[in-house]
Image (cartoon, rainbow, N blue to C red):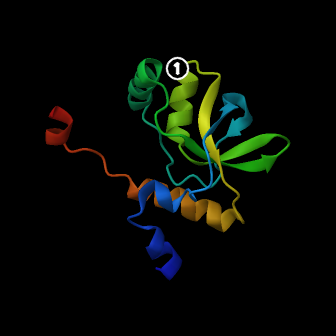
Amino acid sequence: MSQEKRRGLGRGLSALLPADEGVRTLPIDQLQPNRHQPRSWFDDSGLDELAASIRAQGVIQPLIVTPSGSGTYAIVAGERRWRAARRAGLKVVPVVVRQVRDDRQLLELALVENLQRADLNPIEEAE
């Protein structure tokens, strides 16, 4: 594993977001899935649960996107939230726009975001 990749591990969202990039909203229809998305399957019941949560609480963590041309943005991190927000009927979602050098960096950032996530265990969920 490269030194750059190791530096990203364990840093969570800060590995994806430089401190000077702020949150804004974009129309949900201007976002498109990342063609390098490491997650190949999205559980329908899980998306329905997340959509219900988004209806009640909104999108709590912004999606990370990068310009992809013609006024559209590719999702770097947060495709599951985007899919659930669409199911929830949202028209806009919070995003952080990040410039990505190339497809390799796009894939690396998507992998870091997915590898960093640790689901709550059943005891934590019950508390």
Quarter of the picture holding the C terminus: top left
Left/right placement of residue 73 relative to residue 124 reads: right
- Relative to 52, say whether 17 is above or below: below
Q: How many marks?
A: 1
**Rendered location of residue 10, percent (x, y):** 38, 65
Q: Secondary structure at mark 1?
A: loop
Q: Which residue is mark 1?
A: 88
Residue visible at 59% across and 35% down in the picture: 94
Question: Seen in the image, is 66 located left or right of residue 16?
Answer: right
| Spot occupied by residue 71 in the image (x, y as percentages of width and height) | 82, 40
Coordinates of residue 114 in the picture (x, y in percent): 45, 54
Q: Is residue 121 visible?
A: yes
* In the displayed structure image, the side of residue 70 where residue 98 appears, left or right: left
Q: Horizontal and vertical percent for residue 87?
A: 54, 22
Residue at 39%, 57% (x, y): give it. 116
Near-viewer residue (106 or 60): 60
Q: Nearer the viewer, residue 22 or 33?
A: 22
Q: Image point 44% across, 29% down: which residue? A: 47
- Tell me if residue 41 comes above or below residue 13 in the rendering: above
117 or 62: nearer the viewer: 62
Residue extending furthest front? 20
Quadrant assignment, res 48: top left
Q: Would residue 56 appear left or right of 68 to someone viewing this image? A: left
Q: Residue at x 42, y 35 (%)?
A: 43
Q: Which class describes the residues within 10 Å of circle 1: few (<14), some (14-19), or many (20+)?
A: many
Q: Would you say residue 2 is visible in this rendering?
A: no
Look at label 1 and name its amino acid.
Ala
- Seen in the picture, residue 99 relative to 58 is either above or below; the reply is below
